[in-house]
Image (cartoon, rainbow, N blue to C red):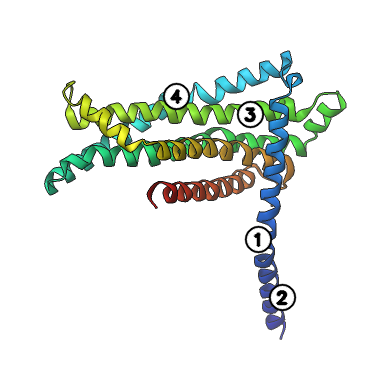
Amino acid sequence: MTLLSQASRHASRSLQGIARAPLRWAQACWRVLHFGALILALAITPSSYRRENRQAMARHLYMDTVPLLPWFTLLSAVISLVLTRIVVVTAISYGLTQYALEMLIRVLVLELIPLTAALFVALRCTIPHGADLAAMRRDGTLDALRRQGIDPVGRELLPRVVAGVFSTTMLAALSCVVAMVLAYIGVYGFTWAGLPGYTRMFGQVFNPAVTLVFGLKTALFSLAVSLMPMAGGLYESTGDGSRTSAELQGLVRVFAVLLLIELASLVGNYY
């Protein structure tokens, strides 16, 4: 009888947890939207760029972008070379060589590179920053800044968000250029003969609608990986209070949102 009652209580708690899950996600989305509006207001306020805040922003822009550039460029180059070789060999075997380059541009530049850049920045920068902010909130650092007359959002959060947006955009742009160059070399080799056809095909792929979707997707990726971990670190409490728990929660939510944005972009591009 005791085991039966324990199982019943456990099932009841599980059902309650499942029922509350949509509410928790709705609350998290509202907090992210509220935090995004707050960051936007601070970003357009001249007082947010006082000397101390400018120094913090410059430091985060450098630390969140420059150390990542060589490694992510190398990663994107390896991915581009491998996919280019696979696609070219497959296209030749099926007699579809004329479609190989267009498929490479669509897969690499339109879909894979922006998503990879967003995940790379999230894992290396913004999610650890969110865990740091959660620790600062728990140990009273943010409250200490308020008592000193310093806005912790403008001093600690705004530089991290701006750096995350800038880093994601920079990595995606640079890696797209690397992927385009390597795709051209993989198909045509080291010659200028294929450049007119390549530019014509590139213009056909990046028509105004696709370019708009690509720009919006990259912007939404950068905002998602920058705002969500910071909002979680500022407002939410983790299950066991550990840094690992904060980072795992941030990773799951960021990945879910990136997946939704990617699905929406696929619908916009191909349907």
The residue lying at 83 percent from left, 32 percent from top is 143
Image disc number at residue 69: 4
**Helix, strand or loop under label 3:** helix
Percent position (x, y) of residue 87? 22, 42
Q: Which residue is mark 3?
A: 160
**Helix, strand or loop under label 1:** helix
The residue lying at 56 percent from left, 22 percent from top is 63
Q: Looking at the image, tell me whether mark 1 or mark 4 is earlier in sequence order.
A: 1
Q: Which residue is mark 1?
A: 22
The residue lying at 68 percent from left, 50 percent from top is 28
For marks 3 and 2, give the CA distance: 43 Å
For marks 1 and 4, give the CA distance: 38 Å
Percent position (x, y) of residue 78? 31, 33
Name the kind of residue labelled 1 in the image. Pro
Image disc number at residue 9: 2
Name the kind of residue labelled 3 in the image. Arg
